[in-house]
Amino acid sequence: MESGNETTQYIEEYRPIDVEVLHFENKEEFDSYAEKLAKIPLNLAAELCEIRVIMLPDQCGILAKAHHIVSDAWTLTLIANQFYSLVNGEEPKVYSYVEYIGSEDEYLQSKRYQKDREFHLQQFQKCDEILYLSDKESHSYESRRATFVVDKETTATVLSYAKERKLSPFVLFSCALAVYFNRTKQNAEKFFIGTAVLNRTNVREKHAMGMFINTVPMLMELDNSASFAENLASVKSTAYSALMHQKFNYGDVRAELRREFGFSEKLYDVMISYQNASLTGNGGTTTWYHSGCQTESLQMHIDDRDNEGIFRIHYDYQTKVFTEGEIERLHMHIMNLLLSGIADDTQLIHNLPMLTEEERKTVLYDFNNTYAAYPKDRFIHQIIEDNAAHNPEKTAVAAFDRTLTYAQLNEESNRIAHALLKKGIGKGCFVAVLLPRNSHLIPAILGILKTGAAFLSLDPSYPQERIDYLTCECKAAIRIDETTIAELLNESNDDNPDVKIEPDDFFCALHTSGSTGKPKLTVLRQRNLLNFLYANALFWRDVETVISVSIVTFDVFMQDSLLSLAYGKKVVLASNDQIFNQHEFEKLFESENHVMFLSTPTKLIAYIKQSKTRAFMKKISSLIVGGEVFTDELYDLLVECNFGGNVRNGEAQIVFNVYGPAETTIGVSYSSGVLCTPHA
């Protein structure tokens, strides 16, 4: 029964019930019926276990369906075994669940309960960060099952290895799953995987029906510098510890973590279980039907129930998190890791082959076949010089303080370049730029490039200690700020400097957050920027204006500014007030058309939500989103804005979802397309 937010059980007096007898023409017809029945939720206020007798032309059996509140998988096997005994005129052993409830009460008051509690709290403290196999969030429990059969020869290989190493198949598969997790989560060494434990500690409990099973978080502690065999030993120890402390309920674990550490998330999103409860006697077979509903993103069940000499591996997966194709690949990868580890368990886990041969070919050869010819003798500043020569009066930079034509931009950057050259700045030097988002910012950066030096952009809002640290780390020879810019602009020479640049020369220094959280220096080369410019022309197609709100210290600011100028676009450099004031932000778009706009999902969501009219979204032709996960919330907001449906003169609004670490120059991959909306 349910009372408020609590669901509790009560036990009625025994009463006989009529069992429905169902007749089917064949097994396929029955399976179709059973699969549909399994997905119909049971009513908590009604019977929580349903049993039907099944009659086929040449077989008979029962169909049992039970709510997980009152039953575990072992219980369903007990139902089948009792039915089998009764059919054969035998009296099955039966014991009451009430006895188990009494033993549970004793456990809650025992010293063992406190020891189990301490164990799980200590496990949590040993794990620096909670990791999930999938970063997708699902608000739906809808799930499906994919089943794969491991052939007899492969099954025999697995069982033989397990027997030789005195391991259970469960430990072997758990290790393979953990190594897969490790390989797909950037070599993570500590993370939780859940498992289901029988939690029946004596013969009476093993013959009692009810909900005994418990889920236990297993802390995997892998070592990337160790072999498969050594990591296997670690997983064996982990599984043994989980069994030793299996009685402590997972719900209580989470409650204790909330109370002790304020941690309210789940510990894992993947579970693994080993099912080996089998029918007694001969001649019976079982089929298990999935309910289509679960709380974990993924459950992996190794089914070894009916002594067939094969493993049936079931993957129950949330449909909002995984696709059928992803599950197929996941299974192949886990089996590849398992079998390659068994074949040579001295291999380090990061050397175990995971991909299929076809996948290896795709990754190593097909994906890398990206060669395209592009001019390597013309650099970004030279391309902008050409634009200034061909369209001198065209607007290049529009800042809050003034607007620069291409001619003015080129002349100002030339004066800065010649002033720096006179100070000894040139190839191999780094120049720090500490300027507000005004009309001097882009000429200063462009002027540095013309000397052959590389620039380091700094944000004036940074604490002085951070500015000094970043400047010192890249050994900046000089700093351009509001004090020094005037001196540089006093230079009279505004001709294009004649400095020989090479493709491997540095052009930019960036700082990213390292694994320690301390800023990490990375430098980019001229050829990287040229490569990106010519490889991604689609970003600027049908674009007239680029509205820049990107932080100057991020690599995407180069796409906003320098690369957009190389394509001859108008760059609107938003001030801090225009970036953070919604009204001022939207005014930037009023007189512009065919806009390219770069943003993180978080910032874009905020702009859309705060807008009363959302009219600015209609001005965007090229929307580039990166730096974070492209969320369902953002997608829904774009649909609300009819983004993609605002087609003008046959030109569509295109969305680009971009990914790229700073070390790889702005972006390395993207997906793009016209957003499908109800109106488009």
Image: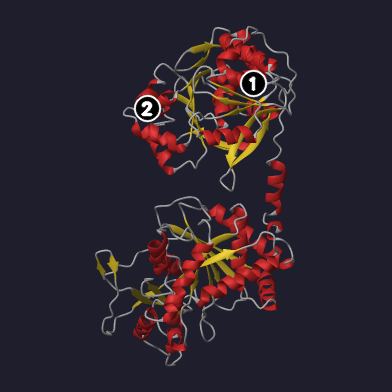
Residue at the left extreme of this rendering: 3
Q: Amino acid at mark 1?
A: Ile
Q: CA distance from mark 1 to mark 2?
A: 31 Å
653 vs 354, left or right, is left
Using the image, determine if residue 231 lies above or below residue 369: below
Quarter holding residue 610: top left
Residue 665 visible in this rendered orientation of the protein: no
- Which of 7/329 is in front? 7
Tell me where residue 378 appears, x and y as whole percent. Answer: 71, 19
Tell me where residue 122 appears, x and y as whole percent. Answer: 50, 67
Query: Which callout, 1 or 2, points to the residue nearer the camera?
Result: 1
Q: Which mark is residue 269?
A: none
Question: What residue did someone put label 1 on?
Answer: 448
Residue 243 visible in this rendered orientation of the protein: yes
- Which of 546/51 is in front? 546
Query: Which residue appears at 71% of the width and 61% of the height?
Result: 348
303 vs 453, left or right, is left
Quarter of the image that includes the C terminus: top left
Question: What residue did someone put label 2 on?
Answer: 581
